[in-house]
Image (cartoon, rainbow, N blue to C red):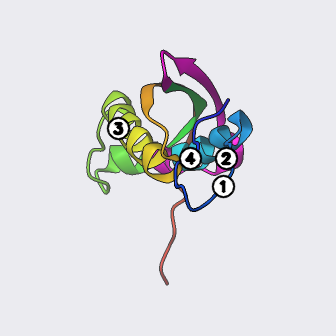
Amino acid sequence: MTTATSTDSRTPGRTRVTERALARVASAVSAEALGVAAEHMKVSVEDQDGLLGLSVRGPIRVPPLARLQRGTTPQPDTLLDRCSRAQVEIRRRVTELTGASVGAVTIRVTGVHLRREVRVR
C-alpha cells in the first residue's frame, strides 16, 4: 500500500509507507486513546476509495468498579462516549503522523483493563 510519494523536486525518489507501518502507528495511537498498552491492540488497515480505513480491536481502560460504587470516583463517561472520542482522536493523530487521509475508524472493544488503585502513604 503506497500512501505517500515525495513530490519535492529537490529530492529524487519515492517514499513508500507500508501497510504494516501504518498499522503500527495506528496501534500506538489507538492504545493511547483507549488508555492501554500498544501490545494489546490489533489494527488492520484497508483502502476505502482512496482513504485509509482502520479497524481497531482491543481493550479499554476503566476505573475500578468498587470505587464507582463507593462514590470516590466521578462517574465516567459511557464506553460509547469514550469510543466516539477515541475514533476522532485516532483519525486526527494518524492523519497528523502519517499524512494519510483517514476515513472510517471502527473500534471493537474486546475487554477492559482496570486502572489500579494507588495508595498514598
Q: What residue type is labelled 2?
A: Arg
Instruction: Please provide percent x and percent y for residue 100.
Output: 49, 39
> Which numbered disc flags the more N-terminal residue, 3 or 1?
1
Q: Looking at numbered disc 4 in the image, what kind of residue is underneath it? A: Ala
Residue 14's tag is: 2
Q: Residue furthest top?
A: 49
Q: Disc 4 or 3, which lies upstream in sequence?
A: 4
Residue labelled with disc 1: 12
Task: Find the distance from the CA under tag 2 to the CA under tag 4.
Answer: 30 Å
Q: Where does the image place residue 56, in percent across and percent down from the top left?
A: 57, 29
Q: Which of marks 2 and 4 is nearer the N terminus?
A: 2
SS at circle 1: loop
**What amino acid is found at the position of numbered circle 1 in the picture?**
Pro
- Magenta part of the protein: which range? 32-51
Sequence-first disc among 4 and 1: 1
Q: Which kind of residue does numbered mark 3 sit on?
A: Val
Q: Name the residue under label 4.
A: 31
Q: Which of marks 3 and 2 is nearer the N terminus?
A: 2
Question: Of the residues tagged 3 and 1, which is closer to the observer?
Answer: 1
User: Label 3 near label 4: C-beta < 8 Å?
Assistant: no
Residue 41 included in the magenta stretch of the image: yes
Q: What percent of the width, then of the height, locates residue 17?
A: 67, 42
Please, what secondary structure does the residue beneath circle 4 have? helix
Residue at image mark 3: 88
Identify the element where label 2 is drawn.
loop
